[in-house]
C-alpha cells in the first residue's frame, strides 16, 4: 500500500494536480487543491491507496512539490 500526502496549507493553487489527476485531486472554492477522500493528519491530508495511478504525475507536476507518495508498512 502507498500513501498520498498533500501539504494543502502550502498549495499555491496552480491546479496542475487536478488537471493531470482528477481521480484524486479537485480544486476547491478556496483556491487550493483537495485530495479527495483524504483525512487530515498533522496539518497535512493523507489517503492510503493500493495503486497511486496518476497521483505520481500530480506529484511530478506540482511546482511547489507538496504532493508526496510514501510507502505504508502493513
Ligand atoms: Fe496546489 Fe500543487 Fe496542486 S500547488 S493546486 S497541490 S499542483
Image: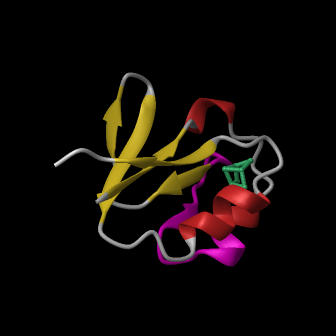
Rendered location of residue 69, percent (x, y): 51, 51
User: Residue at coordinates 50% horizontally, 76% vertically from top-left?
Assistant: 53
Q: Tell whether 1 sits left or right of 14.
A: left
Quadrant location, the N terminus: bottom left
From which residue to which does the magenta span run?
Answer: 18-32
Q: Which residue is more in the foreground, 32 or 16?
A: 16
Q: Dominant secondary structure of the magenta stretch? A: loop
Rendered location of residue 74, percent (x, y): 16, 49
**What colouring style does the render use?**
secondary structure
Rendered location of residue 33, percent (x, y): 60, 53
Q: Tell whether 38 sits left or right of 24.
A: left
Q: Tell whether 45 sits left or right of 31.
A: left
Q: Which residue is more in the foreground, 67 or 23?
A: 67
Visible residue check, residue 15? no
Residue farthest along the left direction in this orientation = 74
The part of the image, by quadrant, that contains residue 30 is top right
Q: Is residue 30 above or below residue 2?
A: above
User: Residue at coordinates 45% horizontally, 69% vertically from top-left?
Assistant: 52
The part of the image, by quadrant, that contains residue 46 is top left
Q: Is residue 54 above or below residue 60?
A: below
Magenta span includes 37: no
User: Residue at coordinates 57% horizontally, 56% vertically from top-left?
Assistant: 28
User: Residue at coordinates 56% horizontally, 77% vertically from top-left?
Assistant: 22
Q: Is residue 46 above or below residue 29?
A: above
Q: Tell whether 73 sits left or right of 32.
A: left
Residue farthest along the top direction in this orientation = 42
Visible residue check, residue 53? yes
Q: How many marks?
A: 0
Q: Which residue is more in the foreground, 22 or 73?
A: 73
Amino acid at each position: 500500500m502507498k500513501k498520498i500526502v498533500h501539504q494543502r496549507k502550502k498549495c499555491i493553487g496552480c491546479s496542475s494536480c487536478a488537471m493531470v489527476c482528477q481521480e484524486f485531486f479537485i480544486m476547491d472554492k478556496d483556491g487550493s487543491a483537495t485530495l479527495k477522500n483524504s483525512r487530515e493528519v498533522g496539518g497535512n491530508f493523507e489517503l492510503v491507496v493500493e495503486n497511486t495511478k496518476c497521483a505520481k504525475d500530480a506529484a511530478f507536476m506540482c511546482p511547489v512539490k507538496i504532493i508526496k507518495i510514501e510507502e505504508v508498512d502493513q
